[in-house]
Image (cartoon, coloured by chain):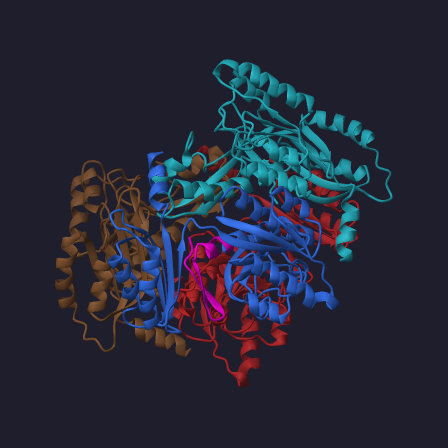
Chain colours: A brown, B cyan, C red, D blue
Amino acid sequence: MSLSTSVQEQVSDTQIITASCPGGLGTVDAVTAYLYQQGCYINEINSFDDIDTQRFFIRIEFRPDRQSAFNRENFISGFKTKAASFDMDWTLTRKDDKAKVVIMVSKHDHCLNDLLYRYRTGDLKIEIPAIISNHPDLEELAKWHGIPYFHLPVNKDIKPQQEAMIWKIIQDCDADLVVLARYMQVLSSEMCQRLAGWAINIHHSLLPGFKGAKPYYQAYHKGVKLVGATAHYISDDLDEGPIITQGVETVDHSHYPADLAAKGQAIECQTLSRAVRWHIEQRVFLHGEKSVVFAK
Amino acid sequence: MSLSTSVQEQVSDTQIITASCPGGLGTVDAVTAYLYQQGCYINEINSFDDIDTQRFFIRIEFRPDRQSAFNRENFISGFKTKAASFDMDWTLTRKDDKAKVVIMVSKHDHCLNDLLYRYRTGDLKIEIPAIISNHPDLEELAKWHGIPYFHLPVNKDIKPQQEAMIWKIIQDCDADLVVLARYMQVLSSEMCQRLAGWAINIHHSLLPGFKGAKPYYQAYHKGVKLVGATAHYISDDLDEGPIITQGVETVDHSHYPADLAAKGQAIECQTLSRAVRWHIEQRVFLHGEKSVVFAK
Amino acid sequence: MSLSTSVQEQVSDTQIITASCPGGLGTVDAVTAYLYQQGCYINEINSFDDIDTQRFFIRIEFRPDRQSAFNRENFISGFKTKAASFDMDWTLTRKDDKAKVVIMVSKHDHCLNDLLYRYRTGDLKIEIPAIISNHPDLEELAKWHGIPYFHLPVNKDIKPQQEAMIWKIIQDCDADLVVLARYMQVLSSEMCQRLAGWAINIHHSLLPGFKGAKPYYQAYHKGVKLVGATAHYISDDLDEGPIITQGVETVDHSHYPADLAAKGQAIECQTLSRAVRWHIEQRVFLHGEKSVVFAK
Amino acid sequence: MSLSTSVQEQVSDTQIITASCPGGLGTVDAVTAYLYQQGCYINEINSFDDIDTQRFFIRIEFRPDRQSAFNRENFISGFKTKAASFDMDWTLTRKDDKAKVVIMVSKHDHCLNDLLYRYRTGDLKIEIPAIISNHPDLEELAKWHGIPYFHLPVNKDIKPQQEAMIWKIIQDCDADLVVLARYMQVLSSEMCQRLAGWAINIHHSLLPGFKGAKPYYQAYHKGVKLVGATAHYISDDLDEGPIITQGVETVDHSHYPADLAAKGQAIECQTLSRAVRWHIEQRVFLHGEKSVVFAK
């Protein structure tokens, strides 16, 4: 037991730094030497330098050494200069900080229920300032968790206004991440662009196998022996953004579409929550139409 | 240990009967009552009646009871009448009989090597009367296993003649099954029709995800997080026949196309040999563009 | 889409018959011939005859043919005689009937939450007449689902009385199944015997790997690369009853005990709900210290 | 295609450095700063600092920058001093260098066959200077691959002499790794100590589930629903050394011991070859009774 306590104590001030930039000599050293100089103790590094596109990615978990007087502001201003000289995109996050996640849903509640359970028990270190839906069905579930529920019906005529309201809520919440937990509406191209790279969608299929609607019907008619789900970032094309993670399960001839859907929904939950976890733990980097993921 | 011996002895005369026909009252009884009447002891039944298409499928492993004098010829002629009245397709196979399998390859040997190992050790109960290839590369491997190797080069001009030679070999061998273990040529429509439903192809991708050539390059450029393989029967369209089984493995950003291919090849071997096993154990039924598989 | 409706309609009066008895000629026919005679249309059969122990198991899903006038009482009384002559244990269940499941918990809510979600959405066709706990913690969760919650604290001195109260609740509910969804108390030998074969426990480990307490600590100290969970029936020895199903996930050196537990809990939920589903769908047969499971 | 060629070219002089030492400020910098100073371009880093035991592990793939004149001798002598000041264990390996692997077998050939296939096709970058067996059965297989086969029968009386001969062969070959690919003999305590940490054993079970002999019989009698295999380093206790990786597959009641063994053997092959790959790619660190594995 003493292990657990000791681990807890030591990781309580853990920080995560991520960076990516064009590949080149010294990119690693730019980060590691700085951490050393600032008296930071490194728990874990993952780095990757893509030979194909010549781009470098690094993620480091570290904690201030007990003797050192870590000053976050100084740390940041000091690193800015260094990062600029390497043309680095970078982030610094306290591991214990809770990301603010806005969730969008329609009527299906399996993904929402799973996320709320992980939120409620602290398994996912997130706050949920808002749940947005085009249907009223899931309000009670939101309320029981004490989360504001915004029912914003939509049809073709009022779509621009509805999306404007959604966007306002997301901004008012100062959201770090938007999760489309089976929000069954196609977003406008403008909305997609706004959310590109920081909104995660769950596609109820193994992309690119069955794009579009009713993938379980498509799968049934093809007689596939595996069903799956894909969590990916939104991009211009809703079903085409960078894939974060995918899940799969075996099925057979006795699975009618409803059975495929039931098995599929379990995979959707697992796949989506895994993607959210990796995103908020800063394990995922956008990399053109793909992603770099330091999985755990 | 005595268990194993006893099991061996008792299953040595095990027979497998399969049947399929339009769904209707009494289809099961047509088979099970007949087995009872013939003094046959049933080890295992799997049946399925497809509500969607109203078609019935059954597979039974049985053995003649020790007291009964089982006569195969009588059994068959007796069942013929019954089967006809239900418009049944049916088969009767001794479990220990070895299927004659003709294997077709090009240069890649991973699937062939895996099949030969399972053949050599008796894991797959098959004979391999011929290996056919459009390249000479794998002849030594065939020879070490004492299997005739037919090197039949092919190009556009001689394709009809080459396929005629292939077809002759298959017929001369009296083959029960043809396995395309990475035979990298497109077969003519005529050849496909001849082999439809009794030739198994391994597609190095999770169909219908990446049809066509170089699926690992396609997968790389899409940044997928899973690669897989699909074993399916040949139909008119080489990449579209009824799926028998599929396999999958996780990958990440650090997998370049060659790494994806290496992981993929392991899955191809496993998936193809599983499909062959289920086919020769009479576990697979064609069912329009799909299959019914009583897996083990 | 019409498929789904049609499927629904036809399966609405689906029945499940299961039987097991000493192996012998005619065991299958005893059931299938009777169904035929009663005008029953068979959707699916699974049978298995254990060569080792000479015992026979069968499960059939069927529906009365539209033309036939199915009378449940007549069916039952007719089958009783037949079953008796084969010394059969047997059950007849309407597929749509909801099993009455009493759930026992302590403080951990992950398994309970998962079961309640599947109950609420109809994914598991069950009623939950009572949740029993030795702690008050999960009462609110039960209440939100409208389920009576019985808080029955326990210590060494009052254990017999507490178990007597539990037993009374189970009997008053006329429970079909008891699920120990992380009820962290050892049951008395008397209680185990009462529940043997119809109470499912989830053991937070791959049995028989890490029996007893704190399996995730044991796993951590052994440096295992897989963690798992085991759903099994209760027997005299709480950790030793017949296994129904097991689940597993990969882990690595960076997983401290708390991380192992987090991954493990996800597997516990999936494994337990799968066991409950198979039990209530009559897919599981007790078979000495083991089980026969016709999985889907 | 150009990608593949370019990747190939650039990785052709890739080096792998690994190090481990007591945790402390500057351990990472000791390596990364040195690489930068030596003009080395880093492809990939994995590091881990165990909070429980306060030990640090790092693995880096790097290549000399094109402009820099990399001198291996200078690199090594320069790093020695640095490493000493941190009390580091460390290794430097060229990625393309082939490890010399001595394989020990008895009569079962499934693991040997799998390793030889991966050796023959270059999938595993190894040389196999010797195959040692206490039985003559697998000599032909070795010969076809052009590998010396040493048949060293053993019984209680001559065990010391036989092990001395084994040890001499291993030394004469200058082996980097010994693989016990189902060598069904218990090694003496002295032999175990000599091989501790650089001999990999495949245990045909999910340790610590079924230690000792005939695990598939044990598994059968317990009615487990999963079988698995464990690849681990040898330590004093043959079945207890640090686990490298484990594999698993589902089974059911219809799997008699022979069926379990057949499924198990497929997992043994996969698990053992994965462990060998990770070992020779310098991905595995001994860490007391456990291992740290930077898996791919």
Q: Residue at x 61, y 73 (%)?
A: C191
Let me know if residue D286 is in the magenta part.
yes
| B155 relative to D169 in the view: left or right | left
- Left or right: where A101 falls relative to A161: right
Q: Residue at point 61% right, 71% down?
A: D190
- Which of the 4 image quarters holds residue D55? bottom left
| Vertical position of residue C134 compared to residue A118: above or below | below
Magenta stretch contains residue C98: no
Residue A296 visible to an observer of this rendering: no
The number of numbered discs placed on residues in the rendered structure image is 0
Q: Pick the residue in front: A211 or D58.
A: D58
Q: Is residue D215 left or right of residue B153?
A: right
The location of residue B119, given as percent across then percent down, is 66, 39
Quarter occupied by the N terminus of chain D: top left
Closer to the camera, C295 or A67?
A67
The answer to which quarter of the image holds residue C197 is bottom right
Residue D110 drawn at (x, y percent): 62, 49
What residue is rendered at 49% in x and 13% in y? B157
Please state the horizontal and vertical placement of residue C82, each as a whole percent of the image.
Answer: 76, 49
The relative height of residue A195 versus residue D217 in the rendered view (above or below) is: above
Q: Nearer the viewer, residue C175 or D89?
A: D89
Q: Nearer the viewer, residue B86 or A174?
A: A174
- On the image, the x and y values in percent for residue B39 come to 82, 40
The answer to whether residue A59 of the structure is visible from this angle is yes
Query: What segment carries the magenta color?
Result: D276-296
